[in-house]
Structures are given as structure tokens and as C-alpha cells.
Image: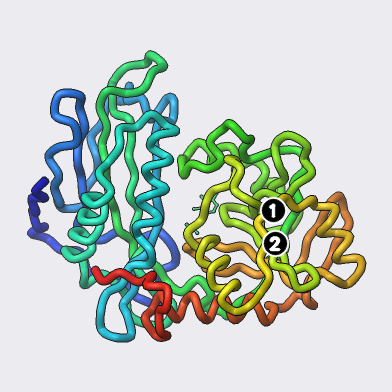
């Protein structure tokens, strides 16, 4: 399929690179492609960034049939513009689409579309420590019909946002509230899918954690409220007595690209890595016995987000004196080093745009 390109006649002025933040600014162009039953996916195009015009009856507004992805383009140290394991995002997109009854997108074409858009707005990849261009592909159900059924028409869109360094003020471990009332997802639900509904379900707990002075929630499993699932919108890892433990993928956890990369990297460092069920009681027991050495979240935005404190029912444990641990730091340095093309990439994770 061909991608037609219509360039803007009025490029925006670029934001101050020191004030980018996250997801506030958008580039000059976006990618669009439509789906209907007669034509399949068609009319792939890059056009000037502008508001969408949609019927208020569109299925996505009422029943949340949608998916999204998140990845980044990096200005590499070698002068090349790099993506980090985009095929993994596209593979996940296919799984999300299937769960949400959204028609599949050809994986090779999805990568081509991402690259084409990044190339059109290549001047928007910010330079400088920790800065990158966040890529947000998403698909929405567009049938103007209030019946509950999979839409017959869809819009696939990709937008780009230059983002600042996540740790502009250095890596400060975060305080996490163990949530025992609300749950994010259950096995059989949509927990493994990257879809807005999971985020809508998470907001109330996040608000509660913030009211208590915590920055994010540690989610427990939706059935017994006993096992660790994720932290905020990140996967979670605990280093207990030399074993790096992360919950295994059983359908309720988002299979993070960063999670997978952390597992591979830690193994390559010679660390014992386990993907298994981890009871929150085991985490607190380890903390009481001085065996909980490190804990961190993993995700595209922060890469590694160290956990400095956990609070469960008022019992607080401080991890590694509230400072980033040695393994967390090494994983962060190596992963970001590969992403920005500063260190060698033995896994072949970087893809040139
Ligand atoms: C996107 C996401 C992650 C992290 O996935 P990455 O591919 O590493 O960015 C983890 N948990 C949830 C709920 C997510 O939506």
C-alpha cells in the first residue's frame, strides 16, 4: 500500500527543548488510514496535524473500542535516528487488536507507516540528554451507531510528541501505595491489551494513592488481591536475595517491551531471573528480613523507575535506603545506552528509521 504525503504549508515553531515535558506538544504531521469492510485498510496518508472530525455517535466514545501503542524515536549518538524494538510494539498491537475485535493491520506496513511519519517530522526528534520523540499509534472504532457490537469502520492514527528527559532532576525513587481495594485487570479481561479502558479503570486508585502522598499504585491480582501485578502503568521487578523476580504473563499483565528487555539484559549480566507469581506477603517478608534489595518499575517512558518505599495498610518499608540500587542503575544505563546508540547493541534491538 502506498502512503500519500501532504506536507503542511504552515510548520509550527518548535517548543523550547528544555520545557518539553511529556505529551504536551505535537509535530506538524500525522498518519491516518481508514478501514471499512469493502476496502479493508485503505487510504494511508500523512497529512498536516489537525483536529479529527467525528460523529458524536462513534462507537469509541461510548464503548471504548480502541487500542494504542507507545514507543520512541531517539537521535542516536552515531547520527542515525533509532527506534527501539518496534516489532515488539507491533506484535503487541496485533494481540490488542484481536482482543478488542479490531481488524488486524499488516505488521510490516505498520512499521513502514511509523518510519514514514518519523521521517517526515524528523526535525522534531529533539537532541540532548534523555530527550526523544514519543510515537503514539492508535485505532478507534468510528461507526456512528449506538448498538453494542464491533464497529464496521475504524481509523488508524499515529501522532508524534517530542518529550523531555524523564529524569531531568536525576533518578529519584518513588513511593508506592499497595492497592488492596481497586483492581486494574483480571485474567480473562483485557489486562494484556494496551487499551484505554484499562487506564479508565485505574484512575480512581491512582487518585487515592496521590491523596495519601504516594506517586503510584502497586496493583495486586484481581481475584485474590494477593499477588503482585504491575506498578502504575509499568511492569514491576523485585530483587530478593539475588533473584530478580517479575510476575509472569498470565493474561492480566501488559507484556512490556521494556520488561522483556530487562529480563534479557539481567540474564546477560548473570543475574538469576524468575518470571513467576510473587505474593505481596513474600515481598514484605523479604523486606522485614533485610532481603529485599531493590525494586523498580519498567516502561518506555521512564525505562527504569526505582521504588524507594512501599506502603501496605500503613506498614511502610524503605528499599535500599530510598536510593536507586546497583542493578537498577546498571539496567538503566545499559538500556538507555542502547536506545541512544551510545553502547553496543549485542541483541540487535535498535532499528534505524
Ligand atoms: C505500556 C504499558 C507498560 C509498559 O510497556 P512498555 O512496552 O515497556 O512501554 C506496562 N504496563 C502497562 C499497563 C502499560 O500500558
Residue 340 x %, y %: 38, 78
Q: How far apart are marks 2 and 1 (CA)?
A: 7 Å
Q: Quadrant of residue 169?
A: bottom right
Is residue 28 visible to us here? Answer: no
**Quadrant in which the N terminus appears:** top left
* SS at badge 1: loop
* Label 1 crowd bin: few (<14), some (14–19), many (20+), radius 10 Å: some
On the picture, is 51 further left or further right than 344?
Answer: left
- Residue at the spot 38% in from the left edge and 37% down from the top edge: 97
Q: In which quarter of the image is residue 187?
A: top right
Q: Quadrant of residue 177?
A: bottom right
Asked if residue 122 is positioned above or below residue 102 in the image, the reply reads below
Residue 179 x %, y %: 74, 46
What mark, if any, has residue 229 been given in the picture? none
Residue 227 x %, y %: 75, 47
- Residue at the spot 26% in from the left edge and 55% down from the top edge: 111
- Residue at the spot 44% in from the left edge and 77% down from the top edge: 130
On the picture, is 333 further left or further right than 218?
Answer: left
Contact (Cβ within 8 Å) of mark 2 with mark 1: yes
Q: In this view, which residue lies farthest toward the right?
A: 289
* Label 2 crowd bin: few (<14), some (14–19), many (20+), radius 10 Å: many
The answer to whether the beta carbon of the residue marked 2 is less than 8 Å from any atom of ligand 1 is: no
Is residue 150 visible to us here? Answer: yes
Q: How is the image coloured?
A: rainbow
- Residue at the spot 66% in from the left edge and 70% down from the top edge: 306
On the picture, is 14 further left or further right than 273?
Answer: left
Label whose residue precedes the other's in the sequence (2 or 1):
2
Residue 203 x %, y %: 60, 43
**Quadrant in which the C terminus appears:** bottom left
Asked if residue 206 is positioned above or below residue 214 in the image, the reply reads above
Residue receiving disc 2: 245
Residue receiving disc 1: 276
Amino acid at each position: 500500500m502506498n502512503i500519500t504525503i501532504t506536507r503542511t504549508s504552515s510548520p509550527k515553531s518548535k517548543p523550547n527543548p528544555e520545557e518539553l515535558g511529556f505529551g504536551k506538544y505535537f509535530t506538524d504531521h500525522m498518519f491516518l488510514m481508514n478501514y471499512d469492510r469493502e476496502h479493508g485498510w485503505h487510504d494511508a496518508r500523512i497529512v498536516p496535524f489537525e483536529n479529527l472530525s467525528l460523529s458524536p455517535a462513534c462507537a469509541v466514545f461510548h464503548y471504548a473500542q480502541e487500542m494504542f501503542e507507545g514507543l520512541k524515536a531517539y537521535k542516536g549518538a552515531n547520527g542515525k535516528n533509532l527506534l527501539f524494538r518496534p516489532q515488539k510494539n507491533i506484535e503487541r498491537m496485533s494481540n490488542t487488536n484481536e482482543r478488542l475485535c479490531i481488524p488486524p493491520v499488516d505488521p510490516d506496513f505498520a512499521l513502514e507507516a511509523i518510519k514514514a511519519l518519523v521521517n517526515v517530522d524528523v526535525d522534531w526528534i529533539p537532541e540532548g540528554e534523555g530527550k526523544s520523540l514519543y510515537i503514539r499509534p492508535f485505532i478507534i472504532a468510528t461507526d456512528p451507531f449506538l448498538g453494542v457490537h464491533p464497529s464496521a469502520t475504524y481509523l488508524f492514527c499515529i501522532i508524534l510528541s517530542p518529550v523531555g528527559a524523564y529524569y531531568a532532576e536525576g533518578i529519584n525513587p518513588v513511593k508506592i501505595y499497595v492497592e488492596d481495594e481497586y483492581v486494574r485487570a483480571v485474567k480473562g479481561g483485557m489486562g494484556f491489551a494496551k487499551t484505554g479502558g484499562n487506564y479508565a479503570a485505574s484512575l480512581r486508585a491512582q487518585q487515592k494513592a496521590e491523596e495519601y502522598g504516594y506517586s503510584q499504585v502497586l496493583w495486586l491480582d484481581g481475584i485474590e488481591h494477593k499477588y503482585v501485578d504491575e506498578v502504575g502503568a509499568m511492569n514491576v521487578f523485585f530483587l530478593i536475595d539475588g533473584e530478580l523476580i517479575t510476575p509472569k504473563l498470565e493474561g492480566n499483565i501488559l507484556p512490556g517491551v521494556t520488561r522483556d528487555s530487562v529480563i534479557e539484559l539481567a540474564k546477560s549480566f548473570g543475574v538469576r531471573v524468575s518470571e513467576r507469581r510473587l505474593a505481596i506477603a513474600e515481598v514484605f517478608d523479604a523486606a522485614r528480613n533485610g532481603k529485599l534489595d531493590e525494586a523498580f518499575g519498567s516502561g518506555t517512558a521512564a525505562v527504569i523507575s526505582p521504588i524507594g518505599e512501599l506502603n501496605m495498610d500503613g506498614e511502610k518499608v524503605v528499599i535500599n535506603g530510598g536510593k536507586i540500587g546497583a542493578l537498577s542503575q546498571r539496567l538503566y544505563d545499559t538500556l538507555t545506552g542502547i536506545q541512544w546508540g551510545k553502547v553496543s547493541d549485542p541483541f540487535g534491538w535498535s532499528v534505524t528509521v
